[in-house]
Image: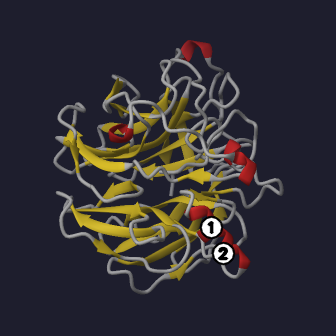
Amino acid sequence: MIRFRPASGLFSVIAVSLLAAAAFAQTDKPLGAQGSAKTYPKLTLDPREKHFSSIRQLTFGGENAEAYFSFDGKKLIFQSTRDGKACDQIYSMGADGSNQKLLSTGTGRTTCAYFLKDGKHVIYSSTHLGGKDCPPRPDFSKGYVWALYPTYDIFVADADGKNPKQLTNTPGYDAEATVSPDGKHVIFTSDRSGDIELYIMDIDGKNVRQVTNTPGYDGGAFFSHDGKKIVWRASRPEGKDLESYQNLLKEHLIRPSTLDIYVMDLDGSHVQRLTNNGKANFAPFFTPDDKKIIFSSNMDDPKGRNFDLYLVNLDGTGLERVTFNDTFDGFPMFSPDGKKLVFCSNRNGIAAGETNTFMVDWKP
């Protein structure tokens, strides 16, 4: 998933641009191996973070993002730049942070991993068939842009990372895949139509169908827990902004300065826009009761560098700020039982650009 983040993928070293605090950045400078909890400050919560209790840090060093639960809630799968690697690879760990291990091939760049419901397989996107090296970073002379690497394809592998099998084989960008609650379908982002749209396919890669069809970027989608709705992030450029968007897209680039959160029914109907603040809103996920969306946004930072978590109703009302941290908070996901929330943050770091994974007990 193209990510806003301070130090890789869409993260950079607190060279703070939108990415520097978002959770999508792209840098080829690794931050190092995982450290020890003993070397980190004691964790504290802001008293205003009233939905959180019992915060625990699961990773210690490097760039760690997009940590998502297995269907049984016992494991997390995530992407990380660590251990001397120049760009993100896919790892798994226990829900308590234990037993962290590499799942992807260790070559190319990877993103957006998810467990399958059977507990025996995982999916993720990778560029490794396009080359063993990390693909080049985008040209920032064009401003702050994300690269949509055309060598990204979606793969399924055994839960230990063995036997990777290609699920998509269409020219262009295929990534940002997540799995439906019944385990039968995958929603993903692709530019195969000439624009960046959302698609749903069967878990084996068959029966692909397009579910968005509006000019602009559509991505980062998740299913509701009841499987009836989809939430995602999107841009809707118009006029000269649309022309600029289309010109960048020809170079496999997008500019993510303005993204909004949308929900729709599973078939693409009844689209509802939830944010309209001119900022970068991303990483949406349904609350356990499917009545609200939790997401990350820089809406309260005039400089656009600090991202916090927010809640909003499905009709766009009832906006509530959840985190009060002066760095980046993003990629929230609830545990299957709804009792915990995992997210990634720059909080409590000991190195510039470091992003770690945190778990909290959730108080509705």
State the CA–CA distance, disc 1 to disc 2: 6 Å
Give the residue drawn at x 34%, y 56%.
Answer: 178
Residue 364, horizontal then vertical, whole percent: 50, 58
Q: Residues within 10 Å of mark 2 (few under 14, many from 20)?
A: few
* Amino acid on which disc 1 is placed: Asn
**Disc ID at residue 243:** 2
Q: Residues within 10 Å of mark 1 (few under 14, many from 20)?
A: few
Question: Mark 1 — residue?
Answer: 247
Give the residue drawn at x 47%, y 63%.
Answer: 219
Would residue 303 be visible to someone looking at this image?
A: yes
* Amino acid on which disc 2 is placed: Glu
Query: Is 29 positioned to the left or the right of 125 in the image?
Result: right
Query: Is 175 positioned to the left or the right of 27 in the image?
Result: left
Dividing the picture into quadrants, the one containing residue 107 is top left
At numbered mark 2, what does the secondary structure look like: helix, strand or loop?
helix
- Front residue of this view, candidates 314 and 102: 102
**Disc ID at residue 337:** none
User: Residue extending furthest right?
Assistant: 302
Residue 188, horizontal then vertical, whole percent: 37, 61
